[in-house]
């Protein structure tokens, strides 16, 4: 015959095991799917934000490139290499404002007439290492 103490211990152990099993089942079949759905939704929203940000950056870059490409000053600069154009249009502040790291001007024979690289993170110019890449 089991003593009352042993019966109480077995009953409490069985209740604890039942509660732990019930907690596990609720977690696996109720909470886990909702957390997975929430995590998936948050990941999709973050990816959507990144894509929208990239689209905005590309749209802004497209606007700047179009303005610079079709300006008479840019065409004159490519033909004459006038230093005044560099002073007024290709300074570090322009790179920072447009958020670009490099600019390359080529003539109609696809020869690089001017290129400049700028490291936005450090706010410094990089020696022209890319000009030969476009030839």
Image: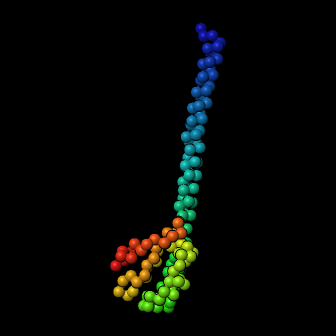
Residue 56, position as x, y percentages in the image: 55, 72
| Residue closest to the eye, 95 or 60 | 95
Residue 58, position as x, y percentages in the image: 51, 73
Q: Is residue 60 visible?
A: no
Residue 122, position as x, y percentages in the image: 52, 66
Classify residue 121 as left or right of residue 4.
left
Asked where in the image residue 98 lies, by quadrant, the reply is: bottom right
Q: Is residue 88 visible?
A: yes
> Which colour assignment does the render follow?
rainbow
Asked where in the image residue 8 lies, by quadrant, the reply is: top right
Residue at the spot 56% in from the left edge and 37% down from the top edge: 25
Classify residue 1 as left or right of residue 112.
right
| Residue closest to the eye, 76 or 12 | 76
Image quarter hosting the N terminus: top right
Residue sitting at the far top: 1
| Residue closest to the eye, 48 or 75 | 75
Residue at the spot 60% in from the left edge and 22% down from the top edge: 13
Asked where in the image residue 113 lies, by quadrant, the reply is: bottom left
Image quarter hosting the C terminus: bottom left
Location of residue 69 with respect to 98 vertically, above or below: below
Location of residue 7 with respect to 128 vertically, above or below: above
Residue at the spot 49% in from the left edge and 69% down from the top edge: 119
Residue at the spot 61% in from the left edge and 26% down from the top edge: 16
Residue 112, position as x, y percentages in the image: 39, 82
Tag count in the figure?
A: 0
């Amino acid at each position: 015959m089991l003593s009352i103490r042993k019966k109480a211990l077995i009953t409490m152990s069985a209740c604890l095991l039942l509660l732990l099993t019930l907690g596990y089942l609720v977690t696996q079949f109720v909470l886990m799917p909702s957390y997975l759905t929430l995590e998936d939704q948050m990941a999709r929203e973050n990816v959507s934000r990144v894509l929208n940000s990239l689209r905005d950056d590309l749209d802004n870059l497209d606007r700047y490139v179009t303005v610079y490409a079709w300006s008479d000053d840019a065409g004159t600069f490519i033909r004459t290499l006038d230093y005044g154009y560099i002073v007024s249009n290709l300074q570090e502040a322009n790179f920072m404002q447009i958020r670009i790291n490099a600019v390359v001007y080529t003539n109609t024979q696809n020869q690089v007439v001017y290129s400049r690289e700028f490291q936005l993170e450090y706010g410094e110019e990089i020696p022209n290492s890319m000009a030969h890449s476009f030839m």
